[in-house]
Amino acid sequence: MGKPASSYAGDGRYPPSYYAASRNIHRTPVALEGEVDTDVCVVGAGYTGLSTAIHLAERGYQVTIVEGAQVGWGASGRNGGQIVNGLNAGLGKIARWYGEETAAFVGGLLQEGARIIDRLVATYKIDCDLKRGNIYAAYTDAHMKELEEKQALWRRYGMDDHRMLDKAALRALVNSDAYRGGMLDTSGGHMHPLNLTLGEARAFESLGGTIYELSPVTRVEHEQARPVIHTGKGRVTARVAVLCGNAYLGDAVPALSSRVMPVSTQMIATEPLGADLARSLIPSDMCVEDVRYILDYFRLSADHRMIFGGGTVYGGTDPADVVAKLRPNLEKVFPQLKGRKIEFAWSGNFALSFSRVPQMGRIGPNTFFAHGYSGHGVTGSHLFGRTLAEAIDGDPARFERFERIRWFPFPGGRRFRAPYSTVGSWWYAFKDAVGL
């Protein structure tokens, strides 16, 4: 692909994930060169940027996306593929920090992101192995109590798609002795995340939109009425700019760089297990995540692999050996897979906010941003994309509600935020270990 696209993306190639190897759309990237003028310039071709762009293009706007690597190169193309409703911060925490009115507002929106994904897949015939149902798995009685409280809280805000599972009921859906029980969310699901992203990009282009890839943004002039987005070989002048770089925006926009911290998480994919063994492991074919602070998450792929993820590294660095880090947890949950070949191992960053609540706002009169999904971005990013499009199209009510939610800086600033978060995670890991 020629010269390196940027320091963070190397030459722009996808990381060696199972998703990149099994993608069903292969694009020919076109880089930005020269001057472009457009209605809306979106920075970042991940879920937030694509959702914003599609919703605006459907309303007749001329939209241009500028992407530093390739479509879905970041978290949108290498995540767990789990459509999990809600935010990292629970509604109870939101109510305590921001008040009951804010919790009620957020609670009324938590399932909208999944419905947006359903609509896009159906409308644009996106082939991404979309399936229904996700399961929260509990190791301890304390975890079961936490899930019961979550079910009651969600019902309080009008959501009644959750069913508690005792050990036997969970075992019928997930064939593992590791868990005490769990909870099923019938409104969740899972899919192939990179194929969803690539399908959304194709849908956007079918609406007349333009995507420039391999064009990392170096600077954004956001103070003036018409923002200007600069890359190494070109620039875009727009009536409105939307910054959706999330964990990979880097220092291109200093006003945003301290608001979130990159955190890496890791994933592995086994060799194909065959239909019989795969279905014996997860008879329900649903996705699963446990409820520990540093959680594991897993599901089956369409070609009967086990895709298993977990672990965090604050600051966004990669562990030396992803397989060595994740295999013990995989074999703890499924001893049946002991010694099975791991064919793919990869890592990637998400953007963590201190409050674990995603942020949306403006850093100039016509420059918007959204980021900080804190590991729960599949549904939230699609919701925020629609909300940003509403605001740009003249209906800012929901955007302004999110904009007013206060954000908090990391203690210790950029230098000490990773050590601070690591020490905090040790405490929560201890609580999980002793069953508190």
Image: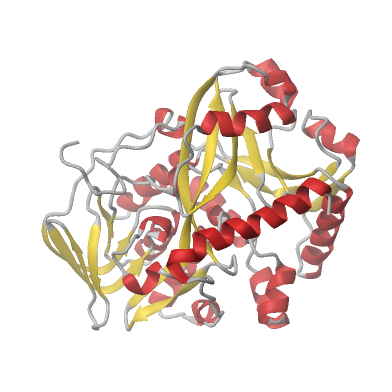
Where residue 248 appears, as percent x and y from the top left, is 37, 55
In front of the other: 353 or 158: 353
Identify whether 315 is placed above or below 319: below
In front of the other: 9 or 102: 9
Identify whether 256 is placed above or below 71: below
Please state if 99 lies on the left or on the right of 312 as rendered: right
Identify whether 259 is placed above or below 287: below
User: Which quadrant does the N terminus fall into?
Assistant: top left
**How many numbered marks, from 0 up?**
0
Residue 359 in sight: yes
Please state if 398 lies on the left or on the right of 45 as rendered: right
Judged from this view, the residue extending furthest toward the left is 34
Please state if 74 lies on the left or on the right of 431 as rendered: left
In front of the other: 125 or 296: 296
User: What's the residue at 69%, 17% (across, down)?
Assistant: 277
Q: Quadrant of residue 224?
A: bottom left
Residue 183 in sight: no
In front of the other: 346 or 432: 432
Report the coloring of the rendering.
secondary structure
User: What's the residue at 69%, 16% (across, down)?
Assistant: 276
User: What's the residue at 41%, 63% (across, down)?
Assistant: 52
